[in-house]
Image (cartoon, coloured by chain):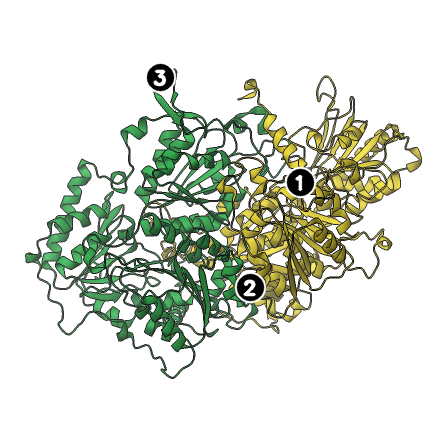
Chain colours: A yellow, B green
């Protein structure tokens, strides 16, 4: 807030020449935003603060605006981080946010950690104190606003200007550069962006406020005009050889397999393999399974879709299919307790498992009597190259799979949700029964962490629907601002999630809908970001499942405890309060299954009355979807053998 | 969210005996809450999560409830941290919050850092994974929800269960204990609480979810039934000697001084010296000054009050008075750029400066030609003991001060705010002219970071009014949830901020008002916490200064830039949306000075129509108080000499 010294000298007509080198230079602020654009990103989220204001001035440079650069101001920094995460999840580009020293960056931290845990590409630019201040003897002893002083004798010792950088470095980001030498900044910026693509994790750049108006050479811009995912993970010669060899190995195993299957897990999408995996499925007709974290990566309407596999925590029907498979190709696998059903994945006897990771490929036989003795690991290989080569080189004629003819593709109806058709109450079971009829192929659904998230797991989604949910890190409140980010990305890259292969399946004039599934307790965490949906004209349908508090926590402990209660709100008044002065929103309360069915049908047909629709759907406080109950029970049962304690 | 295994065996009638020792034991969950109560705290803020649910169950133990324990559920964790900070600022006890592993604790981080920077006593209890999980060989390789995995080969290496602890330790807290051995936990809890009092900074306790139902001995409870501030900073014998010696030194200087003066800075309040310093002033009639961060610690209506001193950034009138003083006693001083007017403090030639810190006392002559050569530092002494001894032992008869008779006590009117009486616009100048007429002695004002915060600085506040503002860390959005915490503390400790000495001055039946001064941009950051004011029946008057965005940033850069804009809201609809179903709130729009004057008069007289009043006060977008402009200008002017760069 207290200002720092800088000169506002920038202009859109600048043409700086470095007198020493004779080369053209541009202000670093422009360089930074140009690099964001070069990485494919157009919108930047964030909140202004005195340490980033001079950088934000570069948002108005015509040559950047002409490339699509725009500022999406958020209500707070956590929301900005969530929005950047959503932007990245939709676009598979980098979600970028700008915050200010301390007060801003720390507020965003949980959003960045979530991006780290869930492999989101987020660039967090933090405006920090002048470089000169942190290197200046006088100032080292001085306590700056937004900066925590030292604990002891804070008035003798200088504060640590890099304290927040030290907090996040090597913890919740794959790359972090605190800029200190103007001669290094271009390479540092490029490195962080390339690391974000390489690791598919968040990165940080800490930008001293006095650097943004200093000029830097444009060599990097000329040498590498664009920074793409594929360039960042390009294999070297030796790796190319390994890729060919491993792909051959996989092909040989596939040609021998009677019952091979594919899992499309989350990193397949993060490394740009969504079209490839669906092409592989379409061409080979291999059985295929979704995962919790990778849901909707493979088109679940494909004719050999066998359900979402989640070990003991998924439906028995799916497990039975999975246990028939003698070869599993798990593409882009992310191993964590949610995605692996609390580590209850089972395999057929002698099944060959191939896990394809971004940094290694693992062959094993998990269900051999002698354990993992046949394990073979190839390190340093990104699976995406293997997937690509596999699609290009597979000889379908050599496949010999013979799946049991009795087994049909998985359908939602098989789960037999027992909904009483006479009931006047909207239940989780009812939602599970009816929800997919609400969706069109190609729509985008963002689902909040909570009880309804569990209800969604096993539903077979329409073709090319993009489903976004923070299924592992599980930070409630994330989905609402994330949906803003998704909506902004859908503006920047219309129909970007739709396959280029199968474009015909979605009518050319169909505008994919953005649907947010939100819970009342979670919504209260980040509710103010609704205003940004109005501000930036994000069309959205919001299903606000109002079950009177933290129902997901009630399922675990304290079903009737007050700590799981939240305030009852008049949800239908919110959008008006948040600035809908020109009547662009519609809010309503839905109490019965009939009303819900009617509304869903109306919206599915595109008969929205307003750009933003908010439906408060009344549900029962203690209504848990059976997947949630099942997860709670199975997690409780697990005991640890004392012998394994170290 | 995913549950962890535990047994709910607790009961309010438990009477555990340790079979080995024969001693009575209680569940650790009860121990922890008992210790919170023993430190003086009654209300606990926070948000439930699966790693803290079993702990929250102990909120319902009758023997704890009987001592006043209660749960204040917040909308999100950052708000909970801010509320805990406000609770502590009002009560000078520990503000306590409970969050969950990762998603919760990280969201609260900026609130904790603010507490650290501003010396607030905050206890952050984080529910974490089972102790058995983090020590178990099998589980070490497993990625838990809410926990970030490792960056590389996350599926081979176990995640670091203590990663978040490592992020905050030695950074934004004075004490942090990650509980790992049930035999140590009681001492660890006590240590963190004592450290919080000792350093007046936040502390963390990370509680494995499986520990809360384990039993622990009650020895500590018997040995030290209460944990008080004074016990935590008790001097040893040697320190006692030093305290006597230093106090004598100060007395001698005081007895010789012609124009001595006192500054009452922020740590005076944090270490419980507010009554002492006012008693010292009342008995000695020494000149006295407020500071930005210590505003309202000394009663500004006292007859020798000389204004708020902030070096070159404060009013010249005040500086002129200050520069007359040959001896300055700066009690509880906190040295930072805001509090020291960007390090522009000036002193009279040969002035003797005595800075009284919590861990050292410094004697110096800052305006000697030879610099600080006369500096003398006594380390390891908490100033509060000296203040106490000084008040007890000062011989008023020996004082020889002779202040210039022409100089009168400082009055707000001296600042000559030029408000046009005909104007129909509510300006910062108008507010500065009229604001103190809105206040009664003994009221409590919480002021948001923003432009109005600068307008408040120099106003002479009524007697015993408590003014709370985050003047150094300056995290916008903090004040609204902090006001909730203040209101909860006012319920727990009614009239606690009023002097016991001068109780007569405030009528016994007067119920101090809680007033929140809030800006529109800041309010949007944390607005949902308004709902908790309704939920927990916190009477409050909210002045929402609506100046169309981040006016404080506009004063620094980009006055008309879109990045400083926020959405216009219909503020008067908010409280209804946030759950005022039984009409306990009143919201209105105030457009003219006349309307504002009428409303302020009505409220000052106690004629509230509802328990919660929200006034949206319309102001001009580019209206800056002159203190803000002054600060911006003087901070810009400062240049660093190249020679001082290291």
Side of B517 relative to A361 (left or right): left
The quadrant of the image that shows the N terminus of chain B is top right
Q: CA distance from mark 2 to mark 1?
A: 31 Å
Task: Give residue B21's mark.
Answer: 3
Tell me the chain of label 3.
Answer: B
**Label 1 SS:** helix
Q: Are marks 3 and 1 on the same chain?
A: no
Determine which residue is flagged by label 2.
A577
Residues at discs 2 and 1 in contact (Cβ within 8 Å): no
Binning the other alpha carbons within 10 Å of mark 3 as few (below 14), some (14 to 19) or many (20 upward) gives: few
Tell me the chain of label 1.
Answer: A
> In the picture shown, does residue B76 fall above or below B142?
below
Q: Quadrant of residue A583?
A: bottom right
**Label 3 SS:** loop
Q: Is residue B125 at all visible to an observer of this figure?
A: yes
Where is residue A531? Give x, y as percent.
58, 62
Tell me the chain of label 2.
Answer: A
Determine which residue is flagged by label 1.
A454
Q: Are marks 3 and 2 on the same chain?
A: no
The one of B535 and A243 positioned closer to us in this rendering: B535
Where is residue A225? Give x, y as percent.
70, 59
Side of A376 relative to A280 (left or right): left
Front label number (3 vs 1): 1
Q: CA distance from mark 3 to mark 1?
A: 47 Å
What residue is rendered at 86% in x and 28% in y? A257
Residues at discs 3 and 2 in contact (Cβ within 8 Å): no
Binning the other alpha carbons within 10 Å of mark 2 as few (below 14), some (14 to 19) or many (20 upward) gives: many
The quadrant of the image that shows the C terminus of chain B is bottom left
Where is residue B150? Give x, y as percent.
59, 37
Q: Is residue A184 at all visible to an observer of this figure?
A: no
């Amino acid at each position: 807030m207290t200002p720092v010294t800088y000169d506002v000298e920038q202009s859109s007509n600048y043409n700086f020449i470095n007198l020493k080198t004779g080369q053209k230079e541009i202000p670093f602020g422009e360089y930074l935003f140009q690099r964001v654009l070069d990485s494919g990103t157009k919108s930047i989220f964030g909140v202004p603060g005195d340490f980033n204001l001079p950088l934000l001035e570069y948002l108005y440079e015509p040559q950047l605006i002409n490339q699509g650069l725009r500022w999406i101001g958020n209500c707070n920094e956590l929301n900005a981080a969530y929005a950047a995460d959503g932007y990245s999840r939709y676009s598979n580009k980098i979600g970028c946010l700008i915050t200010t020293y301390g007060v801003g960056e720390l507020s965003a931290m949980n959003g960045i950690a979530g991006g780290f845990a869930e492999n989101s590409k987020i660039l967090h630019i933090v405006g920090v104190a002048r470089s000169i201040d942190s290197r200046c003897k006088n100032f080292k002893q001085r306590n700056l606003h937004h900066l925590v002083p030292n604990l002891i004798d804070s008035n003798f010792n200088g504060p640590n200007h890099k304290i927040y950088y030290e907090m996040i470095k090597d913890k919740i980001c794959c790359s972090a550069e605190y800029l200190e030498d103007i001669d290094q900044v271009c390479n540092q910026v490029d490195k962080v962006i390339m690391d974000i693509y390489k690791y598919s994790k968040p990165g940080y750049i800490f930008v001293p406020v006095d650097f943004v108006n200093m000029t830097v050479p444009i060599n990097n811009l000329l040498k590498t005009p664009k920074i793409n995912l594929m360039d960042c993970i390009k294999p070297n010669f030796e790796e190319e050889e390994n890729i060919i060899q491993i792909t051959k190995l996989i092909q040989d195993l596939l040609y021998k397999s009677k019952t091979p299957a594919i899992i499309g897990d989350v990193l397949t999408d993060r490394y740009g393999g969504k079209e490839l995996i669906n092409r592989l499925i379409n061409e080979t007709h291999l059985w295929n399974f979704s995962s919790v974290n990778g849901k909707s990566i493979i088109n679940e309407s494909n004719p050999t879709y066998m359900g979402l596999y989640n070990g003991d925590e998924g439906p028995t029907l799916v497990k039975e299919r999975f246990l028939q498979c003698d070869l599993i190709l798990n593409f882009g696998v992310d191993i964590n307790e949610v995605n692996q059903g609390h580590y209850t994945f089972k395999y057929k006897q002698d099944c060959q498992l191939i896990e394809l990771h971004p940094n290694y490929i693992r062959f094993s036989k998990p269900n051999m009597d002698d354990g993992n003795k046949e394990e073979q690991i190839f390190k340093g290989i990104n699976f995406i190259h293997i997937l690509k080569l596999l699609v290009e080189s597979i000889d379908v004629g050599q496949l010999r799979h013979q799946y049991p003819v009795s087994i049909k593709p998985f359908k939602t109806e098989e789960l037999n949700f027992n909904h009483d058709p006479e009931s006047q109450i909207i239940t989780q079971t009812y939602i599970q029964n009816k929800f997919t009829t609400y969706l069109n192929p190609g729509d985008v659904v963002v689902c909040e962490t909570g009880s309804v998230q569990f209800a969604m797991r096993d539903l077979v989604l329409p073709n090319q629907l993009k489903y976004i949910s923070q299924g592992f890190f599980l930070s409630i409140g994330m989905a609402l601002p994330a949906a803003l980010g998704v909506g902004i990305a859908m503006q920047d890259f219309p129909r970007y999630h739709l396959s280029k292969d199968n474009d015909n399946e979605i009518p050319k004039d169909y505008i994919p809908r953005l649907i947010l599934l939100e819970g009342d307790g979670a919504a209260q965490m980040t509710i103010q970001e609704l205003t940004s949906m109005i501000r930036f004209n994000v069309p959205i349908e919001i299903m606000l499942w109002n079950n009177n508090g933290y129902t997901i926590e009630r399922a675990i402990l304290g079903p009737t405890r007050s700590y799981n209660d939240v305030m009852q709100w008049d949800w239908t008044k919110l959008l008006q309060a948040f600035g809908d002065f020109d009547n662009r929103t519609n809010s309503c309360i839905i109490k019965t299954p009939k009303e819900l069915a009617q509304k869903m049908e109306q919206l599915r047909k595109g008969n929205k009355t307003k750009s933003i629709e908010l439906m408060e759907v009344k549900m029962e406080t203690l209504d848990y979807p059976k997947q949630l109950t099942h997860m709670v029970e199975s997690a409780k049962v697990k005991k640890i053998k004392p012998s394994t304690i170290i």
